[in-house]
Image (spheres, helix red, strand yellow):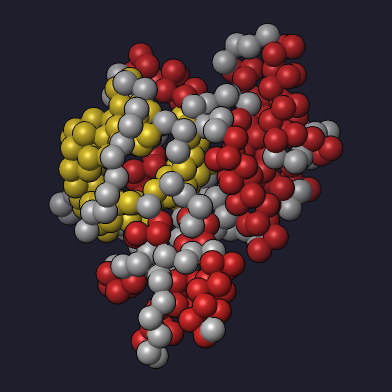
């Protein structure tokens, strides 16, 4: 089910992208991505949803060449991820933030961890200092720059991981379920950073998530199922397909769910009132 979406200049493009995992020596490969064609417009905030096994994380790992296509190709700023000579340049342009921040933290001091990537890219010390300070201030962790990462909370660690990616000055950041292991406070702090990055226009944001509320501010929502794109469009359009989303094992934002259930009780409410304020106003107008 496709909704209206016309891509402009794309930073990421997949052409007939196919990928399969081998589950055992004598078993046939399990196809995870089935001829995926996508374009992600530069400077946008794109959310990718899907049940477990839908292919969304496998897609994410293709966007900066952690995985390489078995069929088709992935282009980052026109650079083919299958070309080994371009690997460093591609990973400078597309950064990844993973579910578990402990997997990205490599140093014993916060500022040294954030400096790790710029140092390996060969930037001069003064440029590294500037990048580290700017990145830590962006994620609200500058005052912790001399702390030990292992003593921080999960949300603070995730913000350090984000700072480490920002220090590379990427054109795009892919967040692969960055709040899945966090408590509500940590999750809120990370979502706030994602929204601020989107508002700044500094980077293209691709967010893989299970939390519907994290996607309502996205420019575009892509719903995946069985390695294919099931829906693709603005959140206000996509989340009106309540039954179709539930059939794929997904839900809708709580605001949409409330409006949907009220409609089942005899109301006639718009399902595109995504925020709490819009939802409350829609119900108020109906009662008035």
Residue 112 occupies quadrant: top right
Relative vertical location of residue 131 with respect to residue 254 in this rendering, above or below: above
**Residue 95, visible in the rendered structure:** no
Please determine whether, in this image, residue 288 is positioned above or below residue 282. Answer: below
Q: Is residue 280 visible?
A: yes
Residue that appears at 23% across and 54% down? 2
Q: Residue at x 49, y 64 (%)?
A: 274
Relative horizontal placement of residue 58, taking residue 195 as reference (left or right): left
Q: Position of residue 243 (x, y in %)?
A: 30, 74
In the rendered image, residue 101, in percent from the top left (x then y), is placed at 61, 45
Q: Position of residue 7 (x, y in %)?
A: 31, 36
**Residue placed at 18% from the left, 37% from the top?**
16
Taking the view exactly as shown, the residue that stands out farthest to the bottom is: 265
Q: Position of residue 4 (x, y in %)?
A: 27, 49
Quarter of the rendering occupied by the C terminus: bottom right
Total labels: the figure holds 0
Q: Quadrant of residue 42?
A: top left
Residue 65 against residue 237 in the figure, above or below: above
Left or right: where 153 falls relative to 53: right
Q: Is residue 248 left or right of residue 147?
A: left
Q: Residue furthest front?
A: 288
Q: On the picture, is 287 further left or further right than 184?
A: left
The structure residue drawn at horizontal position 26% and vertical position 35%, both measured from the top left corner, is 14
Occupied quadrant, residue 90:
top left
- The quarter in which the N terminus is drawn is bottom left
Pick the residue in front: 221 or 164. Answer: 221
């Amino acid at each position: 089910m496709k909704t209206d979406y016309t891509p402009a200049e794309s930073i990421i493009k997949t052409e007939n992208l196919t990928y399969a995992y081998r589950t055992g020596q004598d078993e046939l490969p399990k196809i995870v991505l089935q001829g995926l064609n996508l374009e992600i417009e530069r400077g946008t905030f794109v959310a990718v949803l899907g049940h477990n096994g839908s292919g969304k994380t496998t897609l994410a790992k293709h966007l900066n060449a952690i995985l390489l296509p078995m069929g088709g190709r992935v282009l980052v700023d026109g650079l083919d991820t299958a070309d080994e000579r371009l690997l460093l340049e591609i990973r400078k342009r597309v950064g990844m933030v993973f579910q578990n921040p402990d997997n990205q933290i490599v140093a014993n001091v916060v500022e040294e961890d954030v400096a790790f990537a710029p140092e390996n890219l060969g930037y001069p010390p003064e440029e590294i200092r500037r990048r580290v300070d700017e990145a830590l201030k962006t994620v609200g962790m500058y005052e912790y720059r001399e702390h030990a990462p292992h003593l921080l909370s999960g949300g603070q660690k995730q913000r350090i991981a984000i700072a480490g990616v920002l220090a590379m000055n990427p054109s795009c950041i892919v967040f692969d379920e960055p709040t899945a292991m966090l408590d509500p406070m940590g999750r809120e702090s990370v979502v706030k950073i994602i929204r601020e990055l989107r508002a700044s226009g500094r980077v293209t944001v691709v967010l893989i998530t299970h939390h519907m509320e994290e996607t309502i501010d996205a420019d575009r929502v892509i719903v995946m199922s069985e390695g294919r794109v099931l829906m693709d469009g603005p959140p206000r359009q996509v989340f009106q397909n309540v039954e179709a989303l539930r059939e794929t094992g997904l839900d809708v934002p709580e605001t949409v769910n409330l409006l949907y259930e009220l409609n089942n009780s005899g109301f006639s409410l718009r399902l595109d009132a995504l925020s709490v304020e819009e939802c409350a106003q829609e119900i108020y107008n109906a009662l008035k």
